[in-house]
Amino acid sequence: MEPRIGVYICHCGSNIAATVDVEEVAEYAKTLPAVVISRDYKFMCSDPGQDLIKKDIRELGVNRVVVASCSPQMHEPTFRRAVQDAGLNPYYFEMANIREHCSWVTESRKEATEKARALVSAAVHRVYYHQPLENKEVPVHPDTLIVGGGIAGIQAALEIANSGHRVYLVEREPSIGGHMMQLDKTFPTLDCSACILTPKMSLVGAHPMIELLTYSEVDNVSGYVGNFRVKIRKKARYVDASKCNGCGTCMTKCPVKVDSEFDEKLSKRKAIYTPFAQAVPNVTVIDREHCTYFLKGKCRACEKFCERDAIDFEQEDELIEIQVGNVILTTGYKLFDPSPVKEYGYGRFDNVLTSLEFERMVNSAGPTAGHILLKNGKEPESIAIIHCVGSRDEKYHEYCSRVCCMYAMKFAHLLIEHVHGAKVYEFYIDIRSPGKGYEEFYNRVQREGAVFFRGRPGEITDVALTPEEKGKLIVQFEDTLIGKQRRLPVDMVILCSGIEPQSDSQEMAHKFNISCGKEKFFTEKHPKLDPVATMTDGVFIAGCCQGPRDIPDTVAQASAAAARVLALINKGKVEIEADTAVIDEDKCSGCRVCNLLCPYNAITYIEKDKVSHINEALCKGCGTCVAGCPSGAIIHRHFTNDQIDAELQGILV
Amino acid sequence: MSENVHMTFMDEVAALPACDKINECIQCGVCSGSCSTAERWEYPPRKVIAMVRAGMKDELLKSNSIWFCVSCYLCTARCPRDIKPANIVHGLESMALKEGYKPPTTTTTMYRSFAGSITEYGRVYEFGFMLKYFLKTNPFAALKMLPLAISLFTHGRMPLTAKPVKGREQLTKIISKMSEGGVR
């Protein structure tokens, strides 16, 4: 079939036409070999624009199409579909990017037009050599892996499981619940965090379609969308989960006291423990690092008193392998440790707390049973709350942690409620309260009597300059709305620590073949239009692992990720792009250079045939193996030598 | 187009050495909150930056602000946007002198006495430079310092004669090179 090429130059309103002489480019295209028709049009992506292409294919026998418009990232699928609708193979299409690569980055009309001509010429020369290709379909395994059992993981797991599909929920701590479980009340509605979370947790624990793997971590991941194989390490609990009924006798009998991570080290737990009373699953775990038996070879008090014989000191880590079609990462965040901010004295002064420490303190199930107390056991009369600690600061994290303003104001409310006559001072730079009911909450806290000082304090000191400062913590700050440096003596200081990525976020990203941004949060596929997908098909993200966010946003995102997974499960198959690499087995010497080069682990060596083989579902068409093959045995479909040579020639014409 | 005609105060300041991030200030006030002399400033450091951005050149350079900076650099160490307020303040001092504003404090006399001692001896000669400073400002104020001076002297911390460094010719060259185009 002799190529008959149709060329369509898009104005993109004035995005292209204001800088590129589109009519001239269209005229020029007519002079190129095998071009039978060349047109320019205001919006090629519109229905009438696409109809132009379809009509020419039908009426003029056009069998190769070039559209010169925006980036293929935007509209390649649109035009491929149009070409296919008119009866052509969608790969008989080529796009020239004369917007992002040309009009938007070139000031001179002459130069822009010249560049557009070159790009169009390149596309025309290239499309001449295009070959018809078929996209492949692979089945999608209906099970889903969710990593991280905080509110995001819980929400996503329930959404998917409730639709009748199996979910493996992996959590590295002994219980699900995450940071939300540590919180006392939640802004702006002041629901008790545990009261709204624990019903969901017990649903997860009892759900027939959820396999809960707590105290477990993902070891290794292989495969691709629809067909992931995941190895999970179930860490030894030293407690037989099938026998333990969570009676707690072992915890009472255990003689070892360890700082409680759940209570931010403000209370003690035992060496055999559940992190909190409502733990799901309600099965204890032995902390090997602190257990006397593991350290000294004797004790076993827990074993002696366990009525159900559930203690098993011989238990070992167990590796299990599961197959899933999709993955949702909901690995959450870590609180910024304010110790490096020396001027605020965290760790140096007794009564300087982090926000999570305060959450535990104000919680009735916490270390002080909900009483707000100074180290000396007295109630504070005045409390300073400092915003933006570790956030909005180039030395730590440049970003705004989004939740601190709101929780800081929640603290003010709780303090006024819990401590009679307490004076509460908020030190802020800007109050950020953009959410439903958030500004109203700000107003409410002001009505309740919290005092707002605009100014990031310079330092917290215990060096008193006046008698009334004696024995107090003094906040030195500029009241920026007055323009004066002032000192405020208080009893307690709460630092609103920001949200930062988990310390192993990059390792995690590497395991799942996704990327992390500058701040080491997971990167979404598109910040606006594809916020829960990643560049790796079948791997989705939700919650604070993607960036700081509050509970409502996290829940919404988790449901969104679940919907994306369910759509794939429901369809049952995924289409894989045809522009993958393929190995010519006759030419392959079996050197395996490509095996090592492939960034997607898509190439395996077939021992019996002594050649390498590319898994098309894993191949992303990056071309690394093609360039690396010493025998020239790898062909990159849709990027063949003919096509690339022609494209270069076209540009140089 | 002739030079600088359309430059605003803000652009002039941003063009000073290491002052280019002034427009990124978020007015958080950590500089003023940290400043060890802020209580003396007519306008605290944060407001100095705000006034630069607002183009209030005359008002700012006529005020006593900036002249109280003792270069402790706490503002610069703590600034969340790396604005370097101390650099801006010193830049403004230099600008004020070049443009003929009369400093409302004795800071420049102190600077000059100090720099004179360095130029002459290659090190700080406390006795000489303090003497010079007090003679130029308020000789009676020196009397108040007398007990301290005696104490320093008896402890061997303030010799009455200068002990110049070796290789003063080279030092002189370095200093003259540094001073080219600068304010002394």
Image (cartoon, coloured by chain):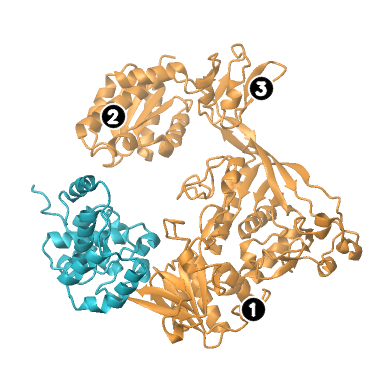
Chain colours: A orange, B cyan
Q: Provide the residue designation for mark 2.
A: A116
A255 up-or-down from A119: above or below: below
Residue A511: give x, y in percent of width and height. Answer: 62, 41
Residue extending farthest to the left is B2
Q: Is residue A127 left or right of residue A383?
A: left
Q: CA distance from mark 3 to mark 2?
A: 44 Å
Looking at the rendering, in which quadrant would you find the N terminus of chain A? Answer: top left
Residue density around tag 3, few if under 14, some if 14–19, many if 20 or more, within 10 Å: some
Q: Name the residue nearer the viewer: A405 or B4.
A: B4
Of the residues tagged 1 and 3, which is closer to the observer?
Answer: 1
The label nearer to you, 2 versus 1, is 1
Q: Is residue A132 visible?
A: yes
Label of residue A605 in the image: 3
Kind of residue at disc 3 = Tyr
Q: Residue at x 22, y 44 (%)?
A: B170
Label 3 and label 2 in one chain: yes
Q: Position of residue A549 (x, y in %)?
A: 51, 60
What residue is shown with label 1? A370
Contact between labelled residues 2 and 3, with CB atoms less than 8 Å apart: no
Compute the Cα span from label 2 to label 1: 69 Å
The answer for how far apart the CA atoms under marks 1 and 3 are is 62 Å
Label 2: chain letter: A
> Please, which chain is the residue tagged with disc 1 on?
A
Across and down, in percent, residue A196 comes to: 64, 69
Q: Nearer the viewer, residue A206 or B101?
A: B101
Judged by depth in the image, the label closer to the viewer, 3 or 2, is 3
Element marked by disc 2: helix
Q: Earlier in the sequence, mark 3 or mark 2?
A: 2
| Of callouts 1 and 3, the N-terminal one | 1
Name the disc covering residue A531, or none.
none
Disc 2 vs disc 1: Cβ atoms closer than 8 Å?
no
Q: Is residue A416 above or below residue B27?
A: below
